[in-house]
Amino acid sequence: MKNNAQLLMPREKMLKFGISALTDVELLALFLRTGTRGKDVLTLAKEMLENFGSLYGLLTSEYEQFSGVHGIGVAKFAQLKGIAELARRYYNVRMREESPLLSPEMTREFLQSQLTGEEREIFMVIFLDSQHRVITHSRLFSGTLNHVEVHPREIIREAIKINASALILAHNHPSGCAEPS
């Protein structure tokens, strides 16, 4: 016999048990809102996650990849891309206003939120105040799949302009190869 949480639709389950009680399928269904002809929203969400492998795979995919999924048109694609961007912006504000970057783990988490899904190498600088709170961050340089050219004078110019006390320099490896580029 199924328990109460399993019998509820995602919205009702969220209201009764909290948002963290939802599975990935239920969370996706909450945003999709409707299914397609002959397919309820939970089935559609389950199939999408199976096709894309994960929420990450789904939210970082391109429109061409959606064309093979029946029931997913421009509107739902735009909605899913909007969710990913909303999460990224939320994290930006949260890091800037609430949390100093006090540990390598916090810094890694912040950088992953900014650089995940990029198709080119991006060189990012995080400018910090004297309490290690984020003043701002900037994608100062963009390169190719496996190379980015960096100009130190530009980094210093920006740091002086905004009166940063500390900097964190980072770049991604979109190719997946961790060898120095």
Image (spheres, helix red, strand yellow):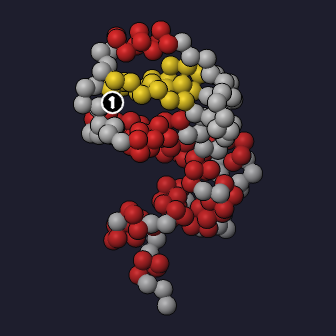
| Numbered circles on residues, count | 1
Residue sitting farthest toward the bottom: 1
Position of residue 112 relative to residue 159, above or below, is below
Q: Nearer the viewer, residue 33 or 178?
A: 178
Q: Residue 166 occupies which quadrant of the picture?
A: top left
Q: Is residue 82 visible?
A: no
Q: Nearer the viewer, residue 75 or 146?
A: 146
Residue sitting farthest toward the front: 180
Position of residue 26 relative to residue 114, above or below, is below
User: Residue 170: x percent and y percent?
Assistant: 50, 29
At 47% across and 11% down in the image, what residue appears? 154
Residue sitting farthest toward the right: 68
User: Residue 39: x percent and y percent?
Assistant: 64, 67
Q: Residue 117 occupies which quadrant of the picture?
A: top right
Please give the residue where the numbered disc 1 appears in the rendered image: 134
The answer to whether residue 119 is left or right of residue 78 is right
User: Residue 19: x percent and y percent?
Assistant: 38, 62
Position of residue 16 relative to residue 167, above or below, is below
Q: Quadrant of the C terminus?
A: top right
Label 1 neighbourhood size at 10 Å, few (<14), some (14-19), many (20+)?
Answer: many
Q: Is residue 111 visible?
A: yes
At 67% across and 40% down in the image, what residue appears? 176
At 47% across and 9% down in the image, what residue appears? 153
Q: Amino acid at mark 1?
A: Val
User: Residue 145: x percent and y percent?
Assistant: 69, 29
Local SS, label 1: strand
At 62% across and 50% down in the image, what residue appears? 57
